[in-house]
């Protein structure tokens, strides 16, 4: 069995004060800071780097220059020869743009873009058109 302290027991009658720690938002409150300064409590102030400003000191580049450097200036479009060949073959087969689009499983806007010369040539789409229209198109792209 453990031995008990055989000495005289002493009680500590000093009051113990428990305080809540102030919230971090309360620590930043100007009233709380001024009160702490008046009462003589230590107050720590730290200057934050670029606090309160949205200024970026990094060198600013022109967005236009960045885009031109990252991407080619213009993509190749369908040549005039190809678009005329598509139109001619489609009209010889007496098809509308919508019918051709349905037969090649594309949207009508795709056929319209190819015939207007606004589309970027896609070899798969041109191959479908060649098969349906029975015309050679891919040897003429981009010339």
Image (cartoon, helix red, strand yellow):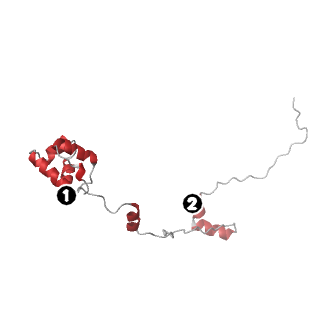
Element carrying mark 1: helix
Q: Position of residue 102 (x, y in %)?
A: 18, 42
Residue for point 19% across, 49% down: 111
Residue for point 20% across, 44% down: 130
Q: Is residue 20 left or right of residue 138?
A: right
Residue for point 24% across, 46% down: 125
Disc 2 residue crowd, few under 14, some 14–19, many 20+, Cα 10 Å: few
Tell me, for residue 25, which label it has, or none. Answer: 2
Disc 1 residue crowd, few under 14, some 14–19, many 20+, Cα 10 Å: some
- Residue at mark 1: 80
* Among the 4 quarters of the image, the one containing residue 116: bottom left
Quadrant of the image containing the C terminus: bottom left
Q: Is residue 19 above or below residue 63?
A: above
Residue for point 24% across, 50% down: 139
In this view, the residue in front, 26 or 16, is: 26
| Distance from Cα at disc 1 to Cα at disc 2 | 68 Å
Q: Is residue 143 above or below residue 34?
A: above
């Amino acid at each position: 069995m453990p031995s008990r302290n055989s000495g005289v027991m002493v009680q500590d009658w000093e009051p113990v004060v428990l305080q809540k720690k102030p919230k971090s938002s309360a620590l930043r409150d100007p009233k709380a800071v001024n009160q702490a300064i008046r009462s003589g409590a230590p107050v720590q102030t730290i200057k934050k780097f670029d606090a309160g400003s949205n200024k970026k000191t990094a060198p600013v580049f022109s967005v236009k220059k960045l885009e031109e450097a990252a991407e080619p200036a213009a993509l190749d479009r369908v040549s005039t020869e190809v678009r005329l060949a598509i139109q001619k073959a489609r009209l010889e087969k007496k098809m509308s743009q919508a019918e051709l689009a349905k037969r090649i499983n594309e949207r009508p806007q795709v056929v319209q873009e190819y015939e207007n010369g606004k589309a970027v040539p896609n070899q798969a789409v041109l191959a479908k058109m060649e098969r349906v229209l029975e015309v050679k198109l891919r040897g003429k792209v981009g010339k």
